[in-house]
Amino acid sequence: MTASLRRLSCAIAAFALTAGLAVSETPSALAAPGDSPSNSSSGTKPRTSPTGATPAITWAQLGMTNQVELIGANQSSDVRMPVPDGVTPLRLTGTISTAIDTAGRVDVFDAQDMQIASIPIPQDLSTAPFSVNISKARITDDASTLKFVIRDYDNDRTDSCVHPPEVTLSQIATTYSGTVSDPTTVADFLPGYLDAITIRVGPDPSPEQQQAAVALVAKLTHMYRPLPLRIDVNTSTGRPPTETGTARRVIDIRDGGKAGIAVEHGGTAGAVLAITGEGPALLRQVELFADRRVALAQTDSVSVMSASEKLTSANDTMTFSQLGLSGQASVLNTAMLYSGFDAGAFGVGQIQSAKVHLLADYTPVVDSEASMLVRAGDTVLASTRLDDTGKVDLDLDIPAEAISSNVGLAFELRYFPKRQCAPLTDRMTFVLDPNSTVTVTPGTNNRGGFPALPMAFTPDFNVSVQDPAQIRYAAQAIHLMAQQSTVALRPNVVPLDEAARDSVGLIVVAPSDELTRLGMNPPIDPADPLRVDGSTITEVDVKSTLGVVQAFSRGDKMILAISGDDALLEHNFDFVYGLQSRWASLDGDVVATGVEGATVNLTIRAGGYLENQVVTSDHWRMWMWFTLAVSGIAAAAVAGALVVRQRRTKRPAA
């Protein structure tokens, strides 16, 4: 090792590795290459855009609403769009429509009010696609604020007696800079954008390889989120095929040899990043990928000499600022403000209720009418008049039926001036106070099932597999959860019997008889007749193999059990990957695939909507900070062999 490389290894080892919120714990000194020191310290980063572009990534995939409603001319509607480190937004695409025939355009500005694009408003109430260049938008704190303003050419009236123009931007997506060249160093092996990463561990990975693989999956997913990157663990004997024209990387985790990380076949399409070492030394190498500090390793090999992980303490109370929950609205007549928080950010596991101490400021209301109504899902938390104090100070209770891994909040604001034909400038401004707090109560008395993912596994949980080659399924489950979590997950590979005795959450890949031996009692045992409760109880022997993924509780411990035929399990995970919001799009507690390859989502025992709860999936998509779609799939068949009517009677959990 050269002296300079040795110094680089020591410098990397000196950093405390993070495991909490990336924004709050990433060392400020680790600016991306090309950032100016002055701008990095202030959080503002001018970025240059390389040639080339990613596929269009929908705003839903970025954790945003796919639709922006604009009402009234010359009124700014602001949207904060995430820009992951290492990429630059290039184009904004979507469709534009209007409910009021308007001759005009929608101007797009950045956070510094510099106009960066214009979108023509279609005539005759038609809908038209748009595609505009937004590469000049300023990026601050890994996000770009876009401001949309309607410009009405014909209407010179400025009072509220004239119906204001209304424009809807929908199916919105962003194209990022995405050129991926053949890597030569550890730093450029993982550029800002990739389509997929394959982690190879061989057909019989050691416990250390398994641990390194699932830890690396969690870290890389967290580093790249919210980009919809696919990360898989490969346990085959040969190298997985390389797809021409895609941005793909291959990482080998090898048990043995000198501890380190090295680029093999650098500068070619067959480049591989080899992570080597024995025991703790192998696991230590993975800590380099906790965040973008990997950009420091600007040589073809590097080693991590020591690592001390900075653990995030559990909190039952956090401020809106800590949760990233914010919002403001300018109101004339009515306006909706959407926000929400990640329940996993508290680090206490599953939660059963929450209290919100809501603080907000608004323009004092004098001689006019104003009010606020707050919802979580379809549950009304509070409603109040807004008066001349200009302050909101309320305590709200979020009940168990509204709790899932991501809790969406909607604020319905109304402001009606009393004077006739008030000017459009007579508006009320409403701003959420970042000092508002959320206090949670840990427990399993919520919806359970898939809606508890990844909340119940944040941040620490166990992973157990009976067959080492099946670690790839546990890795896929972790990858899907980490895409949905603002908190870095910390999986721990342990033997199955030890994990069964432990009290923390568990991802287990094992045959059904092993689950039975350990007394886990999952909703479905693929070896037994399937029982469906309802006005009658039906037991059906499907007389075929099933692949089953199940989310259920055993006492206060959440278990995600994966069992069945390998090929059918692949169908299960392909099914989840194909959903708009992955785990969050699932209802109930079971995803099952039969021999014909048909996959269904079932509510067998838990995880469905609680009694008397009505939640509309379209509302959740709008109200979730992460644009979650809580969609109940009314499944009535497993592989064509089972046909039953969906029934809603509860069966007691074990």
Image (cartoon, helix red, strand yellow):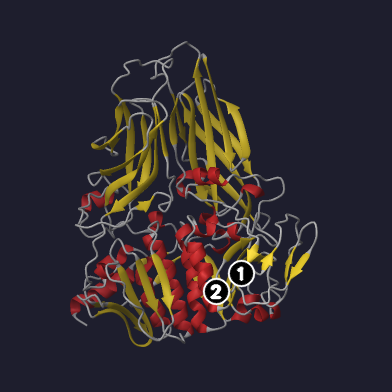
Of residues 370 and 197, which is closer to you in this image?
A: 197
User: Can I make out residue 493 in this image?
Assistant: no
User: Could you tell whether 316 is left or right of 66 in the image?
Assistant: right
Q: Which of pointers 1 and 2 indicates the residue nearer the eye?
A: 1
Q: Which residue is mark 1?
A: 639
Which residue type does callout 1 highlight? Ala
Q: Residue 543: give x, y in percent of width and height.
A: 68, 77
Of residues 402 and 486, which is closer to you in this image?
A: 402
Marks 1 & 2, CB-CB < 8 Å contact: no
User: Could you tell whether 194 is left or right of 300 in the image?
Assistant: right
Q: Quadrant of the C terminus?
A: bottom right
Which residue type does callout 2 highlight? Leu
Q: Which residue is mark 2?
A: 568
Residue at 45 percent of width and 60 percent of height: 483
Q: Residue furthest top?
A: 420
The vertical placement of 491 against 585, above or below, is below
The vertical placement of 350 against 412, above or below, is below
